[in-house]
Every structure is written in C-alpha cells, then in structure tokens.
Amino acid sequence: MYQQLETDRLLIRPIATTDSRFILELVNTPGWLQFIGDRNIRNTDDAENYIQKIIDNQHFFYSVFELKETQQPIGLVTFLYRDNQEFPDIGFALLPQFEKNGYTFEAASKYLNELVQHKVSPTITGITDPENEKSIKLLKRLGLTFQRNFMQLNKELSLYAINIQ
C-alpha cells in the first residue's frame, strides 16, 4: 500500500528511483548487511535497478521516510506480500546515524495504523533475525507478538504478528 503520510517530524512517501543514493548508503550499512543481507548494490546504477524491481513488484511496497524539516531520507518502512508467507509483513530500516531518536517507531506506527484503518489483512506479521534485538524491541512496541521461529534458506527467522480484525 503506497500512500503519502506525515507525522510530527517525518514525511513518508513511496520509494522512487531518485532515491538511489540513499538506498546505496542504507543497504550497505552494517545493520542491513548483518540482518537483511548483501544485495550486491555497489553504485547508484545498481541502486536504481534495485528500486525499479521493487516498484515493478505489485506485492512489495517500500516507503521512504524523511525528515520533514530537510526532506533528507533517513529510513524505510516496507510492506511485503511474500509468496512463502500466509500474511503480509511490515519491515523497517534506518541509517545508523539517526538511531535512538524514535524515528523508526514514528514512521512504522503511522504506517501500521494506516494498514489497520484500511483493513488490508486480518493479520500483519514482522519477520526478523532472532538476534536482531533492535528489530524485536520495535516489533513488540508496535504491538506484534512472537509466534514462532522458522527456517528459510538455511537461516532461522522469528515471526511476530498482530491480528487487526
């Protein structure tokens, strides 16, 4: 679900190919590489191609959140309908220099509230590495609860969920 949203400090908007510099930086941060994985994005052309694939996928929704004052992109909120999952999942990522300011919670809670209002699914999940303490803490703060661990591509993942209907 793509929408233009606004919070006290943030603007949330659909990703665009013009976000290539921001995506190049974000997907090569230590946290992304450790918990999400290397996407082999090494330059802005790679980033543009990555973004275009996301835009072309009718089941993936990536929204950039940026500081309202400067319009600097600082993070992502994602909403994905994955073929191998029963329900769609919400995700998030933030540039490390903006951590510990509540930005990701602010963006993700606004986005989740919109999903609930539009009743997009009876359940929304969050999938994370069981060692990603920051992600787990945020999922819980958003109201998702632990459901189970599962294996995917020889990697253990944790599934959190919230029932919204």
Image (cartoon, rainbow, N blue to C red):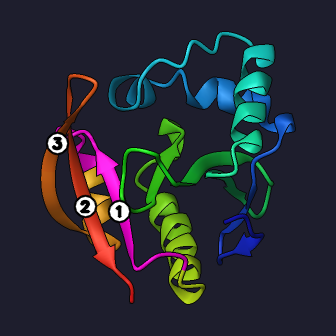
Q: Residue at x 78, y 70 (%)?
A: 4
Snapshot quadrant of residue 124? bottom left
The amino acid type, in three-letter code, at marker 1 is Thr
Q: Could you say which is closer to the camera, residue 100 or residue 73?
A: 73
Circle 2 residues within 10 Å: few <14, some 14–19, many ≥20: many
- The answer to whether 67 is drawn above or below residue 43 in the figure is below
Snapshot quadrant of residue 34? top left
User: Mark 2–mark 1 contact, CB under 8 Å?
Assistant: yes
Query: Is the C terminus in the top left, top right, bottom left or bottom right quadrant?
Result: bottom left
User: Which residue in the protein does label 1 denote?
Assistant: 125
Whole-Å distance between the Cαs marked 2 and 1?
5 Å
Query: Is the N terminus in the top left, top right, bottom left or bottom right quadrant?
Result: bottom right
User: Which residue in the protein does label 3 denote?
Assistant: 150
Q: Nearer the viewer, mark 2 or mark 3?
A: 3
Q: Secondary structure beneath disc 2?
A: strand
Disc assigned to residue 160: 2
